[in-house]
Image (tube, coloured by chain):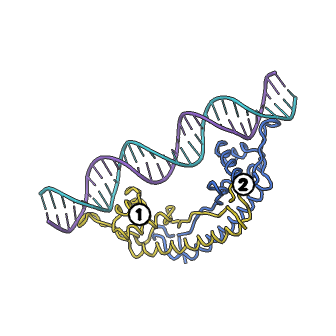
Chain colours: A blue, B yellow, C purple, D cyan
Amino acid sequence: MNNSYQLRGRLWIEGPEGTFLGYGRVILLERIREHGSISAAARSMEMSYRHAWKLVDSMNRQSQQPVVEKKTGGKGGGGALVTESGNLAIECFWAAYKDYKEFLALRTEKLEIQASEAYQQ
Amino acid sequence: MNNSYQLRGRLWIEGPEGTFLGYGRVILLERIREHGSISAAARSMEMSYRHAWKLVDSMNRQSQQPVVEKKTGGKGGGGALVTESGNLAIECFWAAYKDYKEFLALRTEKLEIQASEAYQQ
DNA sequence: TATCGTTATATTCTTCTATACATTACGCTA
DNA sequence: TAGCGTAATGTATAGAAGAATATAACGATA
């Protein structure tokens, strides 16, 4: 049945201080893994360094093992790398996210209301 | 396995203009049904009348049949009531919401990461 | 020792959302 | 016809989140 409504949602993994992992945070981790630094990762996704740093700090505080190891100063000024624990966290989130997307798609098919005709094509 | 992490999320029904129904909107509809006016409903949930009115307007615009019928002036100054279409929308949302909560709870059990020991009890 | 790009951190500016406030329109009722 | 509480609508205000800006600390390297 043609229906212009659909279920949407946001998903995150809640930790002791609030959000531990969400879509944006996981993308950030992947960019850090790719670029080798928080600042390059932030630039690549047009996020302020300040914000990126805070997110990484929040994730590290809430994880048994740090998800990102940082090095200040030295060759290249320093840098950051995603730990094994961080890689597992990324994997864990995407696995849940995949199931989540699937749930939303399937459940959308079961919606029993119709949007305004003004918007129907 | 003891795990202080859990999946959380937000759910809404997306319409042609963005959000059609969400948790707050459905509560608002129920309050309107209960109190018989937008203003009383807004007061009861400490929401500004302006905001409540806009939400109702947004829902009505996106629905084939209005979800709320409004009466201006007259006995008691007027009022608002939830239509049959509105009642169906409420029901539809809660049904999806229930499945959603169930999904999150079940999927949380399958999470394979652990929060920081600092937070474990 | 000077340089470099990074991490780390404080402060200010923007932007968005919702509230607060104010005013008009409305229509039944006394 | 005046009063009532609502719908309807515009404008101003407040708070929060994030961006923008600025500066210091760091440590390998030339």
Check disc 1 and give the amino acid type.
Val
Q: In this view, does D12 lie above or below B15?
A: above
Horizontal relation, residue A30 to residue B80: left or right: right
Task: Please state the horizontal and vertical placement of residue A27, each as a whole percent of the image.
Answer: 70, 54
Secondary structure at numbered mark 1: helix
Instruction: Give the residue drawn at x 78%, y 56%.
Output: A85
User: What is the x, y in percent for residue A72?
Assistant: 77, 38
Q: Quadrant of residue B106?
A: bottom right
Q: In this figure, which residue is indicated by the disc labeled 1? A: B56
The residue at the point 73 percent across, 43 percent down is A40
Give the chain letter at badge 2.
Answer: A
Q: Name the residue nearer the viewer: A97 or A86.
A: A86
Residue at 66 percent of width and 70 percent of height: A102
Q: In which quarter of the image is the N terminus of chain A?
A: bottom right
B3 relative to B102, above or below? above
Judging depth in this view, the residue of A30 and B105 nearest the camera is B105
Q: Are marks 1 and 2 on the same chain?
A: no
**Residue B72 image position (x, y, % from top left):** 28, 64
Between the residue at mark 1 and the residue at mark 2, the CA separation in whole angstroms equals 42 Å
The amino acid sitting under disc 2 is Ser
Q: Kindly check if marks 1 and 2 are in contact, taking CB atoms under 8 A apart as contact.
A: no
Q: Mark 1 lies on which chain?
A: B
Q: Which mark is residue A63?
A: 2
At label 2, counting other C-alpha atoms closer than 10 Å, the crowd grade (few under 14, some 14-19, many 20 or more) is many
Q: Note whether residue A46 is visible.
A: no
Q: Is mark 2 on a helix, strand or loop?
A: loop
Q: Inspect this view and state whether residue B28 appears.
A: yes
Please state the total of marks drawn on the protein image. Answer: 2
Query: Which circle, 1 or 2, is nearer the viewer?
Result: 2
Residue at 71% in and 69% down: B110
Residue sitting at the far front: B121
